[in-house]
Structures are given as structure tokens and as C-alpha cells.
Image (cartoon, rainbow, N blue to C red):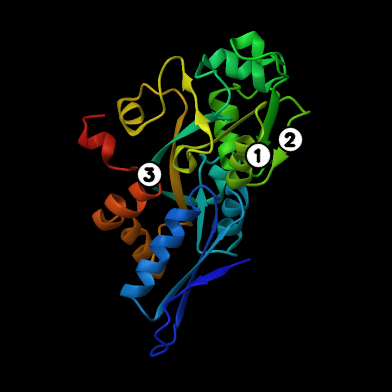
Amino acid sequence: MLVALSGCSGETSPQNKLIVTGSTTIQPIAEVAAEEFHAAHPLDDVLVSGVGSSAGIENVSSGTSDIGTSSREINDEELKLGLVDSPIAYDAIAVIVNPSNPVSSLSKAQIKQIFQGKITNWSDVGGPDLAIGLVNRDEASGTREAFDKIVLDKERFDPTAVILPGTGQVRSVVAQEPRAIGYISLGFVTDDVKALAIDGIEPSEATVVSGTYPVQRVLHLFTKGAPTGLAKEFIDFVLSAKVQDSVVRDAGFIPIGAKEAHGG
């Protein structure tokens, strides 16, 4: 359901609406940016909906939305749709377990085997004698698409995994289940779960900027053709130093200029 993020003054009624749909990972950035944009532009409303990256790309391609947000790259078929990419942030995908799990680091190869169902007990990777409970995302998820590409090399996920539609649901299940393992954006990691090091590298801004953390990605805003009008104004606002240094960082992500600033 679309949520209008608008002010409460009642003195002016919005005359222009911008519809932004897509990634649940990007949703916290988009929602806060929308509130701040409306505060600065009372006649403009930005409506944000988290429906998954694939749906966001489909919506902007069909004209259902003005901006499609995506936490994955567009595929070969989508490249033909005339979409223009405005990258807004960097992100790490964190592999998470329950805090009671003594395992603190896995190799990328071990994670691949776990999510393929080839390693099925925590004792096989230095943990307790417990069956591993796999928590996966649905196929519309950009986080799943990126994880599939980077970690599984586009090979088959274990079909017995629990499938959940959102980042928050994955975190909630892993927080409650000692056997569970899942993956979420670094920006959503809380004390309720434990993020694992991969090949000895912890997920952090420093390791993403340096390129040493192996599971990272770019977050995108897509428009049909070059952005114009209100869409361009909003994208420029998201890319402004004010939003990048506050909203993007506060949401747990890394500003798009961070690598360039560090010579990356």
C-alpha cells in the first residue's frame, strides 16, 4: 500500500505527487528523504512503497511509478527497457545468525554450501550439534538476487529454506531461532542478531569502501529515460550532501561518494 509522506500544517495542499516503489532495503532512505523533501517543498508529495526490487523495476518500466528503487543490478532483459540508473549508496549484505550461536566467521564457500543445503548441521562449521535452519528471501527480492549472484554463483538455493518477503521478517526469525541463518542488508543489522565475518572480514563501512568485504552492492534509483521534473528534483535531493551524510548514514548505508573520497 502506498503511504503518503506529507506534513501536517494543513496550510497548503500538495499539488504534485511522485510515486516511488521497489526495494524494501532502500525504503528507509526513501521514506525519510520523502519527508524532508516535502518539508522543503510543501506542494510536492512523495509516495513510497516497498514492494521488492523486481516490482519496482517493473513499475517504473510500465509507468506505474515515477522512480523504481532496486538493491540489485538490472538484468539483460531489463537493460532493454530504457531505464536510467542513479546510484545512491553502497551496502553490504550481512550473513546473520542468532546471538547464541558461537560461530562468528564462515568462508564464502561454506556459506554457499549452507544455502545450497550441502552443509546441514552447525557442528560441521564449528558450531553446536544443531540442524541449520535456512531463511531465504522471495524471488522478487533484490537482496536475494545479489546474494545469489555473489555467493551462490547463480546456482540453486536449497528449496527447503523458509521463504520470507521482507528484511525485517528475516531478522525477526533469526533473532528468535538459535538454528537459523539468513542474510540482510548491513543497514538492518541490530543487536537482536549477529553478523558473521566472511573469510575473516567483518561487514562495515571501512571494509566496503576498501573493497575487502566480499558481499557488497550498489543501491539504485531507476527512471524511464533520463530523470526530469519532480523525479529529477527528488533524485538530486537524495544525492545531496545533506541526505547522503545524514539520512543514508543514519539508515546504515554508505554514501555513494565514499569510495571516491577514499580513492576507491
Secondary element under disc 1, as helix, strand or loop, is helix
Tag 2 residue:
162
Which residue is identified by label 1? 173
Q: Are the residues tagged 1 and 2 within 8 Å (C-beta)?
A: yes
Residue 172 falls left or right of residue 225: right
Which amino acid does the dot numbered 2 rest on? Val
How much space separates mark 1 and mark 2, taking CA atoms?
10 Å
Can residue 75 be seen by looking at this rendering? no
In screen coordinates, is 112 left or right of 244? Answer: right
Find the distance from the CA under tag 3 to the CA under tag 2.
29 Å
Name which residue lies at 74% across and 30% down. Answer: 161
Q: Position of residue 219 (x, y in %)?
A: 44, 44
Give the left or right position of residue 245, taking residue 143 as reference. Answer: left
Question: Mark 1 or 3, which is nearer the eye?
Answer: 1
Quadrant occupied by the N terminus? bottom right
Q: Residue at x 49, y 51 (%)?
A: 83
Label 3 vs label 2, nearer the camera: 2
- Along the line of sight, the residue nearer the viewer: 182 or 60: 182
> Which circle's residue, 1 or 3, is located before the other in the chain?
3
Q: Measured along the vertical axis of the image, is residue 225 above or below residue 164?
A: below
Say whether marks 1 and 3 touch (CB < 8 Å). no
Please state which of residues 225 and 183 is positioned toward the viewer in this rendering: 183
Earlier sequence position, callout 1 versus callout 2: 2
Q: CA distance from mark 1 to mark 3?
A: 27 Å
Q: Where residue 245 appears, x then y in whole percent?
A: 27, 50
Q: Indicate the position of residue 102 as horizontal and vertical percent values.
A: 55, 19
Residues marked 3 and 2 touching at CB (< 8 Å): no
On the rendered image, what quadrant is the C terminus found in? Answer: top left
Q: Position of residue 46 (x, y in %)?
A: 46, 69
Which residue does the image show at 39% across and 70% down from the upper left? 230
In the current view of this chain or complex, which residue is farthest to the front?
100
Q: Which residue is mark 3?
A: 89
